[in-house]
Image (spheres, grey):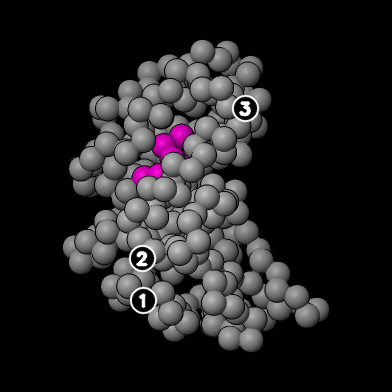
């Protein structure tokens, strides 16, 4: 089983806690994207990033000096979003790191697919960004089947804890024998399941932590997840979509 999650926009450099072990498997592709980004002026980058001047200035400065092979941070520790806060990898025990190293993969618009201890540098590039590179008008086209092929070579079961923006970069290209199991976290409202962005990110991070704490490898064991007020709802679930409901 491989667990896929989204990256976070906010990133940091941390060379003290743990060293990185490997370079990303698609470093050559990331270097292609880096050359394209470095050829763009500030105004074009700010438009691509869709952010304010403070964030644009920070990332423009990073881009000018970016080196994909030195001063790297393990991907697991580089992201600072809500999902990562609830996953809390900085306080993992050794056995949890062993589990995460084997089972967790982080999707990225810049790096494609990351293993937890791949060394990365802070960047800003969402998968849905309209960046033209290598004859492709969009990043989805640039990455194509590569993330799905890499993951399907490792496993026949993918547990999807990523957002739709990132998960479709994999799901659309998987061979049929691979099971693609998505977890939905929501609340009941007027007969519908409503997903709220922040709460979903919290639940996804908490589920990764729970999986690592229990070293779970059977995807069907996920139905026992009961943290943050969520419980599995059999009536709303299917073989490839497990629904967890937070009762109001």
Quadrant, the N terminus: bottom left
Question: Is 210 situated above or below 100?
Answer: below
In this picture, residue 111 sits left or right of residue 228:
left
Q: Determine the image quadrant of residue 22.
A: top left
Residue 48: x and y in percent read 62, 27
**Residue at x-position 20% and y-position 43%:** 21
According to the image, label 2 marks what residue?
A: 1
Residue 114: x and y in percent read 36, 45
The reply to whether discs 2 and 1 touch (Cβ–Cβ < 8 Å) is yes
Secondary structure under tag 3 reads loop
Secondary structure under tag 2 reads loop
Q: Residue furthest front?
A: 176
Q: Nearer the viewer, residue 60 or 7?
A: 7
According to the image, label 1 marks what residue?
A: 218
Does the magenta-highlighted stretch encompass residue 113?
A: yes
According to the image, label 3 marks what residue?
A: 137
């Amino acid at each position: 089983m491989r667990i896929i999650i989204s990256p976070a926009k906010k990133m940091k450099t941390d060379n003290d806690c743990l060293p990185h072990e490997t370079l990303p498997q698609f470093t050559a592709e990331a270097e292609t994207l880096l050359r394209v980004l470095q050829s763009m002026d500030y105004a074009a980058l700010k438009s691509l990033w869709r952010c304010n001047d403070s964030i644009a200035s920070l990332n423009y400065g990073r881009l000018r000096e970016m080196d994909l092979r030195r001063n790297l941070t393990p991907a697991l520790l580089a992201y600072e979003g809500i999902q990562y806060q609830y996953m809390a990898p900085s306080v993992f025990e050794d056995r949890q790191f062993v589990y995460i190293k084997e089972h967790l993969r982080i999707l990225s618009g810049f790096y494609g697919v990351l293993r937890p201890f791949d060394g990365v540098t802070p960047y800003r590039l969402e998968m849905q960004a309209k960046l033209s590179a290598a004859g492709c008008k969009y990043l989805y086209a640039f990455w194509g089947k590569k993330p799905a092929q890499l993951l399907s070579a490792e496993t026949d079961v993918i547990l999807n804890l990523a957002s739709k923006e990132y998960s479709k970069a994999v799901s659309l290209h998987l061979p049929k024998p691979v099971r693609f199991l998505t977890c939905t976290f929501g609340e009941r409202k007027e007969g519908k399941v409503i997903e709220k962005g922040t709460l979903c990110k919290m639940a996804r991070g908490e589920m990764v932590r729970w999986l690592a704490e229990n070293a779970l490898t059977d995807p069907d064991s996920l139905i026992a997840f009961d943290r943050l007020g969520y419980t599995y709802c059999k009536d709303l679930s299917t073989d490839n979509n497990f629904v967890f409901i937070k009762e109001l």
